[in-house]
Image (tube, rainbow, N blue to C red):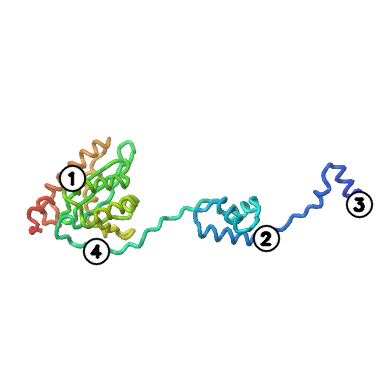
Amino acid sequence: MGSLNEEGLSIRKACQFVGIARSTTQYKKKDKDDKDLIDHLGRLTQKHVNIGFWQCYYRIRNQGYRYNHKRMYRVYTAMKLNIRRRRKKRLPTRLKRELVKCTAQNQVWSMDFVSDKLTNGSSFRILNIIDDYNRESLHIDLDTSMPAKRVIKALDTIAFERGYPANIRMDNGPEFISTALALWSEKHKVTLLHIQPGEPTQNAYIERNNGTMRQEVLDAYMFWSLAQARELIYSWQDDYNHERPHSALGYVSPKSFISNPKIA
């Protein structure tokens, strides 16, 4: 018979009176040591950074441990492993490459993006590609989206007329570090020269080109449509290549420099 409570009733009688099972009063919470489980989960998530809960559960179960999935999920969430961690994509080490003065066309092309907006707030991007030798604007393409395939198409368009370059200098934008562009460069034996992150001066020729375009076109006009932007930018490109004096070329245009490169 159970012990008496303050009212003089046994535990059995008291449980019958309130309508609960006697075993309820005898339950003692078990203290669980989660250290081993924490260690297992920690090692798994450190080795497999994108692993989810059920992958963890079955991996640990397959190792012979019989943790209950509710218990494991409690520990998993307590460790905040259910919160997705966004990891910064790591770039390979970039070597510092000096701006070597080219002695002929197609030795080095440089390319970069410039962004602007239409009057309705829509953003668009401009791909600029130049030849470092005479600073000639080889290609300008603009649209609301410029994926790697669009970049490759632009490069092939230029190469169809003048051949492929030996090198292309660029930053580390997602379009420029894509697998598609890397495969394209291997196919055509073009060396991709990625500048060091945060060092735009290592791509100074295209930065100068971008700055001139922004000052003379992008900051000077309001664009109502992509068609209007293309018309103004292509007109600027024609003037830039054929008429605009360039101080680094002896104050002649890029096209004039080709016909008489000794004037610089």
Badge 1 vs badge 3, beta-carbon distance below 8 Å: no
The residue under label 2 is 33
Residue 189: % across, % down: 24, 56
* Spot occupied by residue 123 in the image (x, y as percentages of width and height): 33, 41
Residue 39: x and y, percent?
59, 61
Q: Which of marks 2 and 4 is nearer the N terminus?
A: 2
Question: Which type of secondary structure does the marked residue at label 2 adopt?
Answer: loop
Disc sitting over residue 237 in the figure: 1
Which disc is residue 57 wearing?
none
Residue shown at 7%/55% (left/top)?
260
Please name the residue shown 82% across and 44% down the image: 20
Identity, as a three-letter code, of the amino acid under mark 3: Met
Mark 1 or 3: the one toward you: 3
Amino acid type assigned to the residue bearing label 4 in the image: Glu
> Which sits earlier in the primary sequence, circle 3 or circle 4?
3
Where residue 180 appears, as percent x and y from the top left, is 32, 50
**Which quadrant holds residue 222?**
top left
Which of discs 2 and 1 lies nearer the camera? The answer is 2
Does dot 4 land on a helix, a strand or a loop? loop
Looking at the rendered image, the quarter that the C terminus falls into is: bottom left
- Amino acid type shown at disc 2: Asp
Lower sequence index among marks 2 and 3:
3
Return the disc, 2 or 1, that comes first in the chain's sequence: 2
**Tag 4 residue:** 98
Residue at which label 3 appears: 1
Real-space Cα separation, disc 4 to disc 1, in angstroms: 27 Å
Question: How many residues crowd mark 4 within 10 Å: few (<14), some (14–19), many (20+)?
Answer: few
The Cα–Cα distance between marks 2 and 3, rounded to whole angstroms, is: 34 Å
Foreground residue among 173 and 181? 181
